[in-house]
Amino acid sequence: MTRYQPQPAAQPDLLAVDFTLETAAAVRRAVASCTRRHLPADAADGFVLAIGEIIANAVVHGGGGGSLRLWRGGEAVHCQVRDQGAGIAAHHMRPERPPSVTACSGRGIWMAHQLCSVAFTTGPRGTTVRLTSAACAAQPAGVRAARAQHAGLN
Amino acid sequence: MDVSATLAGLRFGDHVCAPIRQGRELHAFAVAFARDGLQAGHKVFMAVTHPAPLREHLADRLPTAAGAVTAGQMEIIDSRDNYLGSGGFSPDRLIDRFHGLVDAAHRDGYPGLWVLGDLSGLIPDVPTEAIVDYEARVNRVYAQRSALAVCPYPPEVVGDQAWQQLAAAHPCALTTSGDAVVCRLRSEPTPAGLRLVGEADLTNHAAVPHLLSAVAGRRGGIELDLTAMTYADTASLVEVLRTATARAPRPTTVTCNSHHARVLTLLGAPAIPTLTVTTGGRQ
């Protein structure tokens, strides 16, 4: 089991809500609305995508839904997504390389790692994922590396 | 409930899965659907499980209905005649049929076609999997033609699992209570390709490859305009890359906001030599 010690929210929650398949998009929109007030646009979009992928993972693999908290702490925005699924295997929590274009799944968590800091606590009674945005306008390392590797992007 | 308020503002490219029950709910929605479609000057085509009571209801509640039927602007037929015909359930035949209906609408002077397509009465004679497959594949019609469709599926009749599969095959689905849109994506044809508008996530990204397939087979270059996508999950953007890869050596240009360009880069867009990604603003 991978563990981390959840930190108490430094400030009151920006958002605390449960979600299911039907409400996942609405929760994601609410996350976007909150996040865009605290982060630069590109950083906010990346953070929202990372959260969206973790929400989707909870819906599909974590028992059909979960709960989400979003709060501001220091220069970053933090999010915690909790589900009651059967846990997640270690190799899924930190994919070492991007899945190929032909792969059917496995990209969501990989993408989240590229866009923000992600930490898991998981076990047979559920998974908690903590996501922390890049501070201020700092660009996640994955984006910097990809930009450097593919400098020819228009 | 009457979902017509939830579905206000239907536009070409919409293909919606809606939790509309037979009888009163379907009749109430059909009145609003026919009223809006006829007022906008379009051809309205309704294939429903029980056409006779719907005709009576529309004649009662919509003053323009009878005239529209007589003039050929509105057609109300039995779902079995439309979707099964004499040859059984065939998605390929139905896709051709709906292309033909749009063509006919244009020939008759209508800007486009509004479809109320009720397939729920075909279940279980037609397996749910076959209907899901059809609903996914028919997206290509709505992606490139002046047409829209609303498909009523009562959740308690089709079952929870089938409802989720049916909803996912549509680029837009309502909640099972009908009071909100879960996620809405639609496609608009452009001279060089198509423009995707709205959101794509786990609830509707199964429809994305079918929308893209509407233009993927074109000779020469195509342009995929994603600038009006307010959210695109990783799986949806992978479908864009798959389309570009499958089209090689024909060129594909994607125009999108800087965030989507960044995600496409992370997913390997620069490794596809026939793909050009240009940033075209943030929505």
Image: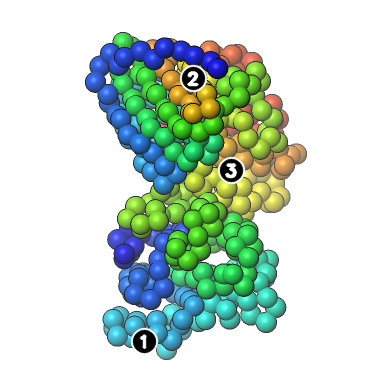
Discs 2, 1: same chain: no
Q: Which residue is mark 3?
A: B223
Q: Of the residues shown, which amino acid type is indicated by label 1?
A: Glu
The residue under the point 39% across, 24% down is A80
Disc 3 vs disc 1: which is toward the camera? 1
The residue under the point 47% across, 49% down is B185
Between A120 and A147, which is closer to the camera in this rendering? A120
Above or below for B120 versus B132: below
Quadrant of the drawing holding the C terminus of chain A: top right
Above or below for B32 versus A66: below
Between B156 and B213, which is closer to the camera in this rendering? B156
Mark 2: secondary structure: strand
User: Local crowd at mark 3 within 10 Å, few (<14), some, or many (≥20)?
Assistant: many
Between B226 and A5, which is closer to the camera in this rendering? A5
Discs 3, 2: same chain: no
The residue under the point 60% across, 30% down is A107
Mark 3: secondary structure: strand
x and y percent of residue A34 in the render? 30, 28
Q: Is residue B272 left or right of residue A131?
A: right
The residue under the point 61% across, 28% down is B267
Q: Of the residues shown, which amino acid type is indicated by label 2?
A: Thr
List the single residue furthest toward the left.
Answer: A12
Q: Is residue A52 something one can see in this rendering?
A: no
Quadrant of the drawing holding the N terminus of chain A: top right
Mark 1: secondary structure: helix
C-alpha gap between disc 3 and disc 1:
46 Å
User: Local crowd at mark 2 within 10 Å, few (<14), some, or many (≥20)?
Assistant: some
- On residue A121, the disc is 2
Q: Is residue B269 something one can see in this rendering?
A: yes
Q: Which residue is mark 1?
A: B56
Discs 3, 1: same chain: yes
x and y percent of residue B180 in the render? 34, 52
